[in-house]
Amino acid sequence: MKKLKLGLLTALVSAMMAAFGLAGLGLAPGDPAAGPVLVIAPPWGVGPEAVVLLAGGRVLGMGSAPFAALADAPSAGALRAAGAWAVLDPKTLSFLCGAPTDT
């Protein structure tokens, strides 16, 4: 049951990203030179941690979600070439975790 819920959540998020596009969701692209980035990768591939390692970066924290990881990497282009769907500024998504914003 837990795998089914995770699969449905992944499918829903993937469909939203495909339908609206990342720009339509208001997500800012990340710049690895400016600090950590949120790497979004397809969950059916090698996974976000492997994408970060293939790009020559390192995963920050204790691990990753099924399709996202916080990482330091040499460049956004290297992450995309390694299979990332998107490289985002993690601050733009902090509201999902209820984190305070610097506004």
Image (cartoon, rainbow, N blue to C red):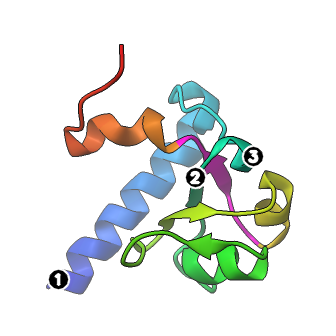
**Residue matched to label 3:** 33
The residue located at (36%, 21%) in the rendering is 102
**Disc number for residue 24:** none
- Measured Cα–Cα span from mark 3 to mark 1: 37 Å
- Measured Cα–Cα span from mark 2 to mark 3: 8 Å
65, 75: nearer the viewer: 75
| Residue 50 horizontal/vertical position (percent) | 63, 84
- Residue most extreme to the top: 103
34, 26: nearer the viewer: 34
**Residue matched to label 2:** 36
Amino acid type of the residue tagged 2 in the rendering: Pro
- Against 94, residue 76 (above or below) is below
The residue located at (70%, 72%) in the rendering is 57
Disc 3: CA contacts within 10 A as few (<14), some (14-19) or many (>=20): few
**Residue matched to label 1:** 2
Q: Secondary structure at mark 2?
A: loop
**Magenta segment range?**
83-89
